[in-house]
Amino acid sequence: MEISVKINGEEHRQEVEPRTLLVHFLRDQIGLTGTNIGCDTSSCGACTVHVNGESVKSCTMFAVQADGEEVLTIEGLASNGELHPMQEAFRQCHALQCGYCTPGMVMASVSLIQENPNPTEAEVREGLEGNLCRCTGYHNIVKAVMEVAK
Amino acid sequence: MIPAAFEYIRADSADAALAALAEHGDEAKLLAGGHSLIPLMRFRLARPEVIVDVGRVDDLKYINDAGDHLAIGALTRHSDVETSDLVKAEAPLLSAATSYVGDPQVRHRGTIGGSVAHGDPASDIPSVLLAFRATLIAQGPGGTREIPVDDFFQGFLETDLAPDEILTEIRLPKAAGAGWSFQKFNRRAQDWAIVGVSALVQNGTAGIGLVNMDSTPVRAAAAEAAVASGASPAEAAESAAIGCEPTSDLNASVEYRQHLARVLTRRALEEATA
Amino acid sequence: MSIMGTRVLRKEDPKFLTEGATYTADVRDPRLEGAAHVHFVRSTFAHAKITSIDISDAASMPGVLGICTADDIPEDVGTVPAAVPLFPPSMMNRPLLATGTARFVGEPVVAVVAETPTQAADAADMVFVDYEPLPVAIDIEDANADNNIIFDDVGTNTAVDFAMMGMATGIGEEDIFADCDVVVKQRIINHKTAPAPLEGRSVACVWEGEKLIIWLSSQAPHGFKGALPGVYEGIDCQVICPDVGGGFGQKIGGTPEELIMPHLSRVYNRPMRWTETRTENFIGIGHGRAQVQYATIGGSSDGEIQSYRLEVIGDSGAYCGLGAFLPFFTHIMAAGVYKIPKIETAAKSVVTNTAPVLAYRGAGRPEATAAIERAIDIFAAECGLSAVEVRRKNLIPADAFPYTTPHGTEYDSGAYETSLDKALEAADYQALLAEQAARRERGDRIQLGIGVSVYVEITGGPAPGGAEFARVHITPEGKAQIFSGAFSHGQSHATTFAMVAADQLGMSIDDIEVVQGDTDKVPEGTGTFASRSLQFGGSAVYDSSREVANQAREIAAKLLEADAEDVVLDTSTGAFHVQGTPAVSKSWADVAAAAANDGVTLQHEGSHNANCSYPFGAHVVVAEVDTETGEVTVPKIVTCDDSGTILNPNIIEGQRHGGIAQGIAQALTEEFVYDEDGNPVTSNFADYGFISAAELPSFTLVPLETPTPNNPLGAKGIGESGAIGSTPALQSAVVNALSHLGIRHIDIPLSPERVWSAISDS
């Protein structure tokens, strides 16, 4: 069926198979490969994007469910060449290594801070429970999110 | 993994969803937030021929003060339940338990009705409904009916809902002044509970719902009876696992689950009565 | 001021943070236009004869281009090249698709090729394989007993006995414990753990005439290029590794799914792609650790250790890859940080009907540390002494280096007691002891345990070390390009190797490009594993940078009309001038332009050979144990890890953080489990206890720098340290929390039920 999705501010009208997951739509049909796929159980959060301003796992949503909605991916987070404060904090805090979890981790962190602007460290850790990272031990990711919250 | 192919029907109203179910019967599955169904479909453990997407049935997204009870539309998202001031005031146990469901992303999509209708014994929310002695409202071709929560969960992933019915509303008796506690025991924050306990205590009676202690969400009936007869939390909790038939799995043996049910029920009752 | 040792931000990050890195599945090269997709049908039996494969329904599915079984693979396509040629041929020469017999659940049996991934998956559903189940060997010790044989032609499940190869000491005639007052023995499980990089395997390939171009997610592009001719004799190929989403040991060699891709691409005459799912990564490629150990330790009752014996049975999984070799590393590092007069080791590897065991962060060395550290704790308990004091009493002293263990391992440098002291101090050990005593006194439900481990490991090993390639090239604009045979898949070489060159060339790191991961651009290389990159690859960059600077001085001398011997390169400014007269100088741009003008290429390349190095450190982990439920939480982790000279503290700390988390995860939540029939039961992130931020505290890192004399940078490897010290420290902490109940050992992972059972049984 045909769907229309606003992605990073731009309207996209495309034909999709109903079983196409949102993450496959973004990667394979729109060509936005920043969003990664890390698992098949909604566990790892590598595919996290925002739908209507809130973090969701784009591997656990069909593209048809996003029809008429607004999607924001890592590619749309910086504006006018300026890194989003969360991107900048990740850079300053060395909160990424291989980079695979990073787009999802950043999008989840942005959503977390929007909903809880002054979290405790424990709240940040709980808030990122659905985003797995194998490289950083989370130490610098938590630090980056706390920096933004400051 | 990629799900098997299906026909997609978007229902704009409960009536439209019912019509689609009536037409396709057993071959159709309702899709709400999708966080129970889509993972199963990705492994092709579920291969519905027809998906009826009720995600846009806005009429079923609400949290209302209905006098003596809260009425929550089945398609209300976990995140909306979790942050609702009304829920925090009148049913803080539900608010607290919801904050433990999945992770933030899951709660942004998953719905209370989807979670309950899936009938998963490992799910947190059914235990809350048991503790509240909630009433569930189902709509079918013949109209609506009320289902007491104790009649709702019929077997493993089986509920009292007929194939042509949909869950529309969950009613929780108001419990603003009641003592409450939610205890979830798991290894990782995002995991399902190994065992969980919801407790609601008021006027000397307790509602105690258990997570993952049987093939369906179950009530700790013996412990509830003990509380009613004046037992202390510690005494009552000794009977928490009576009548339960939990399974043994990677995370816990039957014996350990029974032990956890007793320990967590005691903690829950202590906290609820503190 | 030198850039060395400073907190330079990564050059990789702006792209990774704004558009995402380019992983293999993201590659949109025009040569891959119209690629077909592969989906593997995998064995659902741990051990079975494949009696028939029915592809008729699948072959007629929409979009299907073809279906390949073992029978369809021509004879000129070989088997998986052996990682280490030490084992019986049938155990080692794994077929690309299961041939006649399937030996583990997840082994690829059929490759389905279709126009789209979805069509390939749909068709794979319609392939029907008939199996005739065979008896299985799943448990290591059961396999070792040869109750069921996996390779009939070998006649035993033992793949190698290292003592018989001279690669372990063996158990001698003389009883090394005869003179000991106190002797204790412990069976220790070091369970299967999944490397689980967030990016799984992914391949894209295309034939351009007779040349194969293959993109893949690997730690060692040149290693893969080296493996390909073992399958395709005489193959001409270019291996390109774009960004790689972590490896942790899992992506060192070529696996069957990767190695069959060139064949499929050739047969179906199409560019070909395959990207695995998480479940395939869990069940298909293999796991790390997987040893059963028997540690025997003896000494005097005042805590002096006299003798230590470590017997290891390593699980190879169904085929002998790198994992089958790893018990040898456990042997090498058996003595740990202790001066023990008598050491005996026995080590063997056995095959089981599970996925092949592979390297995982530490690969054989964490297992050695885990064994000796457990043994020390138990020995101290038997003696009634503090485990910290027993450690201190037996540590190899700082003035003993280089130190050779009785079984022949030569440690380069160390300050073991310093690391222990620093870690204990930072953890406020005395206060922790007081808190523990108070909780015991009160009979608190939540008891506190303090775990300590002191470790040493070998990096870049085994001895005598290894080599890595680098070329440093100056562009006509006066900028530098580094072509490295090491390959970053998260380790930050674009930043750190640029720093090494910047320091020697006096350039900004912004003017230095690091080229890696393309075998056509980088003529040779080894790859990144075993914590080897900086010490070998970085040293090669260092060597070639210095040589290029010398070449440039010659050109500069001409421009300055001076003798080359009198010209210096000021590495703080990148200016060439005559010694003593800095006012007149030539820049890299001047020199490069002059060189270009003269037709001179400013370039040097070479391999740096170095002996391996032996990083060490001490970890202090605090555990809280709920004595009612057995639940373990970890409020505090302090580590003092010494990896020699520190190049970039950010990167070093990041490596430590990641290692610590993985080590804690092994002790606490992560275990890859097979049931008794060989069915994997933790084959996704919902069931496998991959640790999250919510289960971990922030870490306290104490710096310590003891340079190695073995390379010009003084750098030891840091990639694996965190994972080596933290696992036994947490295990020790949990046992320590319960020691007043008489508990001396609990195997990892420390699941709540396991801990609760130990408490209940005490």
Image (cartoon, helix red, strand yellow):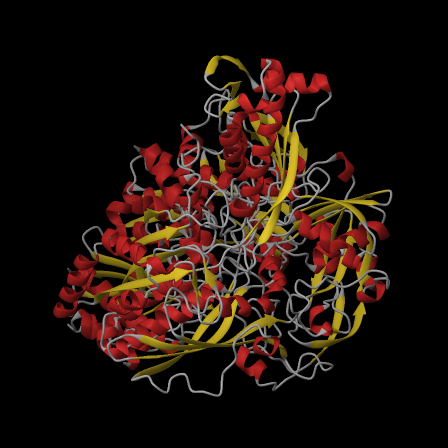
The answer to which of B96 and C322 lies nearer the viewer is: C322
Residue C66, position in %: x, y? 83, 55
The answer to which of C605 and C634 lies nearer the viewer is: C605
Examine the image and state in which quarter residue B49 appears.
Answer: bottom right
- The total of numbered circles placed on residues is 0
What residue sits 67% from the left and 52% below the top?
A: C223
Which quadrant, please, contains the N terminus of chain C?
top left
Q: Look at the image and tell me whether residue C622 can be seen.
A: yes
Is C655 rendered above or below residue C110? above
Q: Look at the image and tell me whether residue A2 can be seen.
A: no
Residue B226, position in %: x, y? 21, 74
Examine the image and state in which quarter residue C761 appears.
Answer: bottom left
Residue lying at the far top in this picture: please name it. C584
What residue sits 81% from the left and 68% below the top?
A: C54
Which quadrant, please, contains the C terminus of chain C?
bottom left
Answer left or right for C33 relative to A147. right
Residue C686, position in %: x, y? 49, 58
